[in-house]
Image (tube, rainbow, N blue to C red):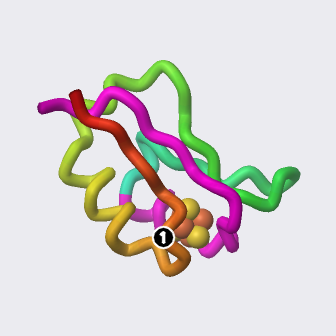
């Protein structure tokens, strides 16, 4: 099982925690006022960090798909 896809659902409050946990994958977009997922990254290299970010998100909007 490897993480193939990561996304953020509606409701992000831009707290910055995901970017702090894993700046290789998450970036707060000030214009959108939401965190975004950086594209073109091999997410399988950051599985622990992505899972930790998802668990730490205060509004539970970080989702990922393993395959
Ligand atoms: S931890 Fe959750 S609420 Fe905070 S910036 Fe990341 S996605 Fe948004």
Compared with residue 4, is residue 51 higher up or lower down, i.e. above or below?
A: below
Q: Which residues are magenta?
A: 1-21
Q: Residue at x 63, y 46 (%)?
A: 36
Asked if residue 4 lies in the magenta stretch, the reply is yes
Compared with residue 1, is residue 55 higher up or lower down, i.e. above or below?
A: below
Q: Residue at x 52, y 43 (%)?
A: 7
Where is the C terminus found, in terms of image quarters? top left
Q: From this viewpoint, is residue 16 visible? A: no
Which of the pair 22/60 is nearer the observer? Answer: 60
Side of 63 relative to 61 (left or right): left
Side of 37 relative to 32 (left or right): left
Compared with residue 42, is residue 38 higher up or lower down, i.e. above or below?
A: below
What is the x, y in percent for residue 61?
Answer: 53, 62
Which corner quadrant of the figure contains ligand 1? bottom right
Disc 1: residue Cβ within 8 A of ligand 1's nearest atom: yes
- Return the residue at label 1: 60
What is the x, y in percent for residue 38?
Answer: 55, 34
What is the x, y in percent for residue 10?
Answer: 69, 59
Side of 37 relative to 55 (left or right): right
What is the x, y in percent for residue 11?
Answer: 69, 67
């Amino acid at each position: 099982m490897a993480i193939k896809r990561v996304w953020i659902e509606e409701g992000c409050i831009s707290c910055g925690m995901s970017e702090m946990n894993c700046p290789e994958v998450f970036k707060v977009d000030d214009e959108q006022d939401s965190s975004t997922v950086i594209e073109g990254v091999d997410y399988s290299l950051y599985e622990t960090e992505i899972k930790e970010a998802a668990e730490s998100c205060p509004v539970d909007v970080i989702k990922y798909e393993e395959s």
